[in-house]
Image: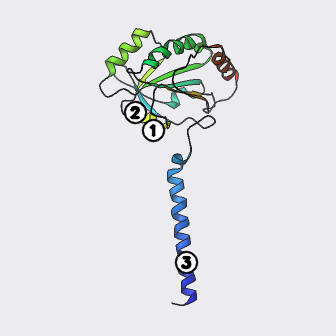
Amino acid sequence: MTARRQWVIAVGVVVAASVALFMGVRTLRDEFVQVTVGTRAPNFRAVTLDSVPQVRTIEAYRGFVTVVNIWATYCAPCRVEMPSLQRLYDEYRDKGLRIVAVSIDAPGMESAIRGFAAELGLTFDILYDSPGAIQRDYMTSGGVPETFVIGKDGVIRFKKLGYEVWDAPDKKALFEQLLAEQGTS
């Protein structure tokens, strides 16, 4: 084999590897970007608990300060946390706060989820994602509750794994700051 032929083969291999790398990064780009404070909130797909379920996505909440809370009925800390989310919602909903609690309970748990929400008097959006795809989309730890606070611009501003008192003074200050900001997605 001549030196020229070896160079042609080497260049061909480098070009093929570069194209494969470029296509791989382009295709899997979302897998390389962590979902954390400072990143754009990923889309999700969950359904309402209405008699005829409606699909909701993050787009329904664009332009609002939004709390995305991932939870389940079997989660004791979720039960403790939810009343503080309700109090926060009661205080700030008219100022542009939206809360969406996405249950990742197993299929067929609609009645239990409705009962949980009714028992605690929850009036914010309760959605259901029985496949739990939101956990993959938001790259959660797998535990519940896990919560993401998203600014009007669609960027995650605060992330919390575990129980939180959402109407505590420091959290209220965070929400007042976010609600005062200009900007939409």
Write down the quadrant of residue 96 in the picture. Answer: top right
Disc 2 marks a residue whose amino acid type is Gly
Work out whether mark 1 precedes mark 3 in sequence or the reverse, and give the earlier one. 3
Count of numbered circles on the image: 3
Residue under the image location 33 percent in, 17 percent down: 112
Q: Which residue is mark 2?
A: 132
Q: Foreground: 139 or 47?
A: 139
Q: Which residue is mark 1?
A: 136
Distance from disc 1 to disc 3, alpha carbons, whole Å, reads: 40 Å
Q: Secondary structure at mark 2?
A: loop
Q: Which residue is mark 3?
A: 10
Residue under the image location 54 percent in, 84 percent down: 6
Q: Looking at the image, is 63 positioned above or below residue 26?
A: above
- Residue 37, image x and y in percent? 62, 34
Mark 3 residue crowding within 10 angstroms, few (<14) / some (14–19) / many (20+): few
Q: Secondary structure at mark 1?
A: helix
Q: Which mark is residue 158?
A: none
Distance from disc 1 to disc 2, alpha carbons, whole Å, reads: 7 Å
Give yes or no for contact between labels 1 and 3 (Cβ–Cβ under 8 Å).
no
